[in-house]
Amino acid sequence: MTTQRRRILIVDDDPLQVGLLGRQLANTGIAASIEGHTSTAAALASLATAIGPDTLVMLDLNMPETDGIVFLRQLAASGFSGSVVLVSGEDERIVETAARLAAAYRIDVLGSLVKPAPPSCLQAMLRRWQEGGRHARTASAPARGYTAAELARAIAEGQLLNHYQPKVDLRSGAFAGVEALVRWQHPEDGLVFPDAFIPGMEASGLIDELTRGVLLRAAADLRALRAEGLRIRLAINVSMDSLDRLGFPELVCAMLDETGLAPAELILEVTESRLGSNPLTALDILARLRLRQIGVSIDDFGTGHSSLRQLRDLPFDELKIDRGFVTGARKLPTRRAIFCGCLDMARELNIRSVAEGVEDRDDWDFVRSSGCDQAQGYFISRPIPAAELPAWHARWQQRCGELIG
């Protein structure tokens, strides 16, 4: 996003709330124009001039003229591609429902704020917006499909690169590992994020070659980090297309032989919501991966429909609690209850727990006091290139004194 074009629209029927939030935003020093609208019609008229990714809407859900649910539907119909923060004094379950509805409309909801907005939470939302939102591409990257030939060329010509999001131990603050997140440095579209090209890789039969490329680059980056004195575990995401092929464990072992990584240094993350498509084959593959001492993590736990059965049947040794139950859980009873339930299951099964979506100091303090094992999120670090990890680690060590105390 270019700083000159950023704009924030506050949409709330109460002029006092518009003024209060406007002052809070101005006090953060955010480089953006700030508009206040007490009418959804006026907000939509203003948005008609610019509906792109450089726009953030701070939306009150409960408005008499047109409620926030209708407004979200209107945003989607207008082709809005910016981000939204839900600001409301309503019951958290209503806010969560509105967020799910927006996601179904393919609107990027950065999160929700309770009135009056706590400054630390507001800062966290703005940080995420400045970094491009939850599923963002850069403004230069259009939402378009890519052909199989373009995708194959991206792999062959080395256009794909890894960014890494650190994971830290919640007891000691120690740097525990990284999750590798693939990006495409497209020659015309700029930096393209995975939601724009992973489905095409799967449809074109290129997903295993993509996984191999991610692992090869990550292994080289980990070797460089070892030279800096950092020994950490690597987590990479695995497509369900790969878990439909019985030869996948042998393929992974061949990749490990090629890279020189030890099996125990690798964690394969499997998204829970997609595990039900071929459970027998997945059980076969995951069991053989664990026999080879390769870690297997259930990602986004709590978002699927058969979580307990999967925990019973599949040999996971790590459970990543979905960000939707972590961010803001200290203040939101429903999220807190679900988070604690997931954590209790991980403890009873004697598997490592990881809290995703730790966005601010409140989230950090909550997950640390809960007894969770590890944490990951923007409060710790955004995903960064490997070359930036040593400097990040030095800064993180300085912060640990205050955070671990």
Image (spheres, grey):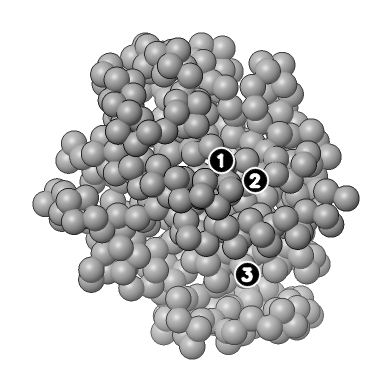
Q: Secondary structure at mark 3?
A: helix
Picture disc at residue 65: none
Q: 347 left or right of 9?
A: right
Distance, label 2 to label 3, CA atoms, is: 26 Å
Pointer 2: what residue? 175
86 lies above or below 212: below
Pointer 1: what residue? 232
Q: 312 left or right of 385?
A: right
Q: Residues within 10 Å of mark 1 (few under 14, many from 20)?
A: some
Distance, label 3 to label 1, CA atoms, is: 30 Å
Q: Which of disc 2 and disc 1 is earlier in sequence?
A: 2
Frontmost residue, 94 versus 175: 175
Frontmost residue, 304 versus 211: 211
* Quarter occupied by residue 337: top right
* Residue depicted at 75% across the width and 49% down the height: 364
Pointer 3: what residue? 126
Q: Where is residue 169? Give x, y as percent.
A: 70, 40
Q: Which of disc 1 and disc 3 is earlier in sequence?
A: 3
- Under mark 3, the amino acid is Leu
Q: Secondary structure at mark 2?
A: strand
